[in-house]
Structures are given as C-alpha cells and as structure tokens.
Amino acid sequence: ENVPLANYDDLLNIAHTATEFHHLFPDVSSALLLSCAKFLQKTIPPASAQLQFAIDQSGTGKEVTVLQLLSLAKDLPAVECSNCGNVECSNCGNVECMDGQGVGVDQFTVGMKLRVNKSFTYWGVNGGSFAGEVFTVKSVDKNDNTVDVRGVSYPIVYQNIPAFCYCCI
C-alpha cells in the first residue's frame, strides 16, 4: 500500500504488471491488485465515475485489468469520509459527504474539521473575518451547547441555526 501513484496510468501499469505475473508471484500480485483497487475506490468513488474510467480504457489493452480492479473495488468496504463519517452507498454509489452542511448538536467530535456557517449572524455578514478559516474541534460541552475550536468556546446553535458547517474537503 506504500507504492506511490502519480496518476491513473501508473495505477494501470502496476495493476497490469501484477496480472501478467500473477501465475509466478500470486501473493505479491494479489496484494498489489488489492492496493490498486483500494486506490481506485478512494480516488474515483461514485460507481458512475468508475464506469466512465473503465470506458475510457477501451482499446488500451488493459480492459481486463480495469475490470479486475473494479471487481475487487466493488467487494471492498465502503469508503468513509474521514471527517463527517458518512459512507458511500453500496447501492447507488453516491457519497453523501456532509461537507458544507450544518453540524447538529450531537454530531460534534474532537478533531472534526469545521468552517463557520455563513448564515449564522454571530460571525458577521457571510461569516465575517472567520469565513475562510478551517477550525478543528478541541472539545465539546454538550451541557452548555458550546464547542471549543481554538481555546475559545463558541455556541453550537442559536435560534436553531448551526454555528458551524462540516469542512471535509
């Protein structure tokens, strides 16, 4: 899993080589193919984009390799967003990442990345001077409904408007 891949040509070259030598080195080849499938799943998550990737490989001589990678990727556990925790739907392939959506009272976790909610007037017009910043949750006080993002406690919600939005990208 530590093979550096600069682009999809590298991915296909490594995977194609692994399939060509599978009969000689089955364990190494299988491990390389699995790593390539994981990379493919993580970098091209929606099923429709993976299909387009496969179509784009038509006529390259690596069509069988692409189908093998997609078959392996299909059987892998769903990719989880490292920030909001939502996963890719195994049925439609839609990644329902919460990026940009308001964070509810019970959704805060330590280490979560946030941006201010520009609709929350506490920050000023369109988020004021905080608009471009990314904050990391340091602690959450659910009794007081506050979150510490930089050594200062801020309200989580006010008049049912979330103070922060997920920042997953």
Image: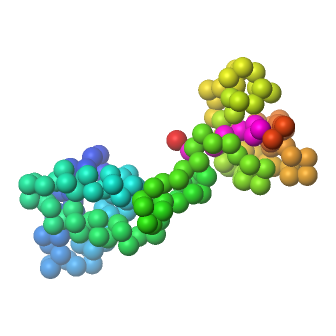
Q: Which residues are magenta?
A: 161-168
Tell me which residue sits at (36%, 68%) in the image: 74
Residue 52 is left or right of residue 113, and the answer is left
Q: Position of residue 13 (x, y in %)?
A: 18, 56
- What is the residue that sits farthest to the right in this orientation? 143
Instruction: Pick the residue in front: 118 or 13.
Output: 118
Q: What percent of the width, then of the height, locates residue 9?
A: 20, 50
The quadrant the N terminus occupies is: bottom left
The answer to which of 112 and 56 lies nearer the viewer is: 56
Residue at 14% x, 72% y is 21
* Magenta-colored stretch includes residue 167: yes
Q: Is residue 81 visible?
A: yes
Residue 47, horizontal then vertical, whole percent: 35, 58
The majority secondary structure of the magenta stretch comes to strand
Of residues 25 and 155, the one nearer the viewer is 155
Its colouring scheme is rainbow
Q: Residue at x 53, y 53 (%)?
A: 96
Q: Quadrant of residue 149?
A: top right
